[in-house]
Image (cartoon, rainbow, N blue to C red):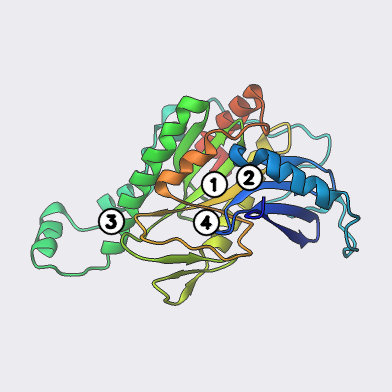
Amino acid sequence: MDELKVSRWRKPGHDRLYVNLPDGTTVAWADCRTGKVTVVVEKYRKEALALLRRHLADPPAPLVPQPKPQDRSKAGPPRPAGRAPRKLPPLTSPDDLALNRPGSGIQDMLRSKGPNRLRRALDRVMRRQTEWDSWFKGLAGERIAGGELDRLTAQGWKVLHSIPLTRGGDIDHLLVGPGGVFTVNTKNFRGKSVWVGNDMVKVNHGPPHPYPAKSRAEAKYARGVLERHCPFPVEVEPVLVFVGVNELPKGATQLQVRVYREREVAALGPLTGRLTPEQVEIVYAVARHRRAWLGS
């Protein structure tokens, strides 16, 4: 049990205890207000529960006044209590996001605006760097991560790719299953070292990038969309997946975004206890409908 450490994460409206491995990987967490415990890594269930019971038994330190539950922040206007969820029109093929392949959003953009095959081949032969290189690298990363996520369908999960947003761009992947709902943001940094903190990421010790903050914003946005159309609250967790990295150290306080290499997303597969099979189908039916995300 000595290798497991307990850390507290608190902000208005939230008070949690996290049990982490020395590398920052979360194995379990508890909501201090409700006492609900979620075990992420079954291997450490016994030790994690013992640690959490010990800490939950101690009265928590005073915290600033909490806002009422109905004041929680969402992306988009909250649905008033008692109001029926918004109805969507019948799903047709053009609006069915389940037909999207990983990276289809980038691929469509490259087809309309990017270089043709001949120009791309010449650039490779001449070893010329172009403005499109990062897009092709992103497309490759989304395809690799999407393939790993698709494997989770054997464990009862539903996966969507390239979900369009009204403000432009898209959510790389959305995962819906018995363990909850996750937005997945993919970054391809093959052969590089990536350090992840609460709000920033550094690649090869370079300047910081706000990828964790962006991932949290995507999860918040997705929650607002899904709760407008579902008859129950929908918690959405953010995930960052780094493709092909050599090293992936995490900051000691890294708690708010799940961080994986591409093969490590298999750790999401065994998660349960968040959604019933019926709720999974309801959330998935909303999530796959393009008009839910575009607000039309």
Could you tell me if the residues under marks 1 and 2 are in contact, i.e. CB atoms within 8 Å? yes
Q: Residues within 10 Å of mark 1 (few under 14, many from 20)?
A: many
Instruction: Decide which of tag 4 and tag 1 comes sooner along the chain.
Output: 4
Instruction: Decide which of tag 1 and tag 2 comes sooner along the chain.
Output: 1
* Residue under pointer 1: 183
* Residue plotted at (42% across, 75% down): 205
- Amino acid type of disc 3? Phe
* Residue under pointer 3: 136
Under tag 3, what secondary structure? helix
- Amino acid type of disc 4? Arg
* Residue plotted at (75% across, 41% down): 37
Instruction: Decide which of tag 3 and tag 4 comes sooner along the chain.
Output: 3
How far apart in space, not on screen, are marks 3 and 4 (Cα)? Answer: 22 Å
Q: Which mark is residue 236?
A: 2
Q: Residues within 10 Å of mark 2 (few under 14, many from 20)?
A: many
Instruction: Decide which of tag 4 and tag 2 comes sooner along the chain.
Output: 4
> Of residues 77 and 230, which is closer to you in this image?
230
How far apart in space, not on screen, are marks 1 and 2 (Cα)? Answer: 7 Å
